[in-house]
Amino acid sequence: MKKLLKWTAIITAALAAVNHIIFYRARRAEDPPFKTFKWRHGNIHYRVCGHGKPLLLIHGIGPGRGAGEWDAVIPMFAKHRRVYAVDLLGFGRSDTPALDYSAYLYATLINDFTEKVIRGKPAVIAEGYSAAFAAAACSLAPERFERLILYLPERDVLPVNGFARAAQILKFVSGLPVLGTALYNIFTSRIMLRVYLERLFSRKRGVTPELVGRYHARAHAGGAAARYLLRSFSAGFLRADMARALEKTNVPSFIIKIHGLPWLEAPRKFYSECKKRFESPLS
């Protein structure tokens, strides 16, 4: 029994040390953000540039996602719009508090960011789960938004919610300090991120080592507490009924089915398609 406890302590200490090294090296690789919004649940980092009507870019949900995904298209939009690209709570350089993340939490964040930072009626571009968050935010305060452009993947690349027993186990384990952090580091390892990105991209050859490195850095920028987001996802807290939310608002909304991440794979084409929808009548 004493030997078992001894080896358990040794393994736990080794895992903790490995976790610390992984997060330390990843944080050094990620560029610092530009601005900070001090929200009640933590600091939210975002980038802003350009002039004109406001545009809010909201990244999707998944390992390594963040505002940096929009880097290729921000300069294009910034020629005609005041562009805001945000790291949602729990992602990138934003804080990763130990709480239950939910669709309502993110809808509230979007509304508060719009009211207190943008202080205008932005057009919103959002993808995947975040499209539902944006729709929910709009249903709560439609007067704060100009229009929504919502990109939905043709298939769910984060299918864990479909396996109830596995999801419950994942929820429990990911909440444990050392083991949960180790599990998170496995899910966000470079190998697993490459697999994830190859499912996201329309063409696998677009997934370069440099791209995987950027996702790896963002996935670890928030520290070990990022595991709480994994726990909330596995519990199903991030799912929202986008269709019902859109029924509650008359804000113009464009829903686009996609396979891939066009803002990364074909940024000029993506910009042109969005620009057409910006020019569409509001009624």
Image (cartoon, rainbow, N blue to C red):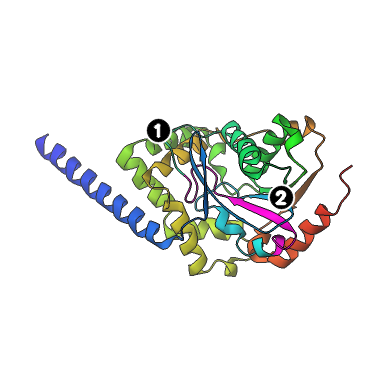
Location of residue 272 with respect to 16 vertically, above or below: below
- At 65% from the left and 44% from the top, the residue drawn is 118
Residue 59 horizontal/vertical position (percent): 60, 50
Mark closer to the chain start, 2 or 1: 2
Amino acid of disc 2: Pro
- Identify the residue under disc 2: 54
Q: Is residue 191 left or right of residue 243?
A: left
Tell me the element at label 1: helix
Examine the image and state in which quarter residue 270 appears: bottom right
- Indicate the quadrant containing the C terminus: top left, top right, bottom left or bottom right: top right
In this rendering, the count of numbered labels is 2
- Magenta region includes residue 81: yes
- At 75% from the left and 65% from the top, the residue drawn is 269
User: Which residue is farthest left?
Assistant: 2
Amino acid of disc 1: Phe
Q: Which residue occupies the foreground of this view, 221 or 198?
A: 221
Residue 19 horizontal/vertical position (percent): 31, 50
Location of residue 193 with respect to 168 vertically, above or below: below
- Indicate the quadrant containing the N terminus: top left, top right, bottom left or bottom right: top left
- Magenta region includes residue 115: no
Residue 161 horizontal/vertical position (percent): 55, 37
Q: Is residue 24 left or right of residue 53?
A: left
Tell me the element at label 2: strand
Q: Is residue 8 left or right of residue 23?
A: left
Residue 211 horizontal/vertical position (percent): 52, 65
- Identify the residue under disc 1: 172
**What segment carries the magenta color?**
76-94
Q: Which residue occupies the foreground of this view, 145 or 237?
A: 145
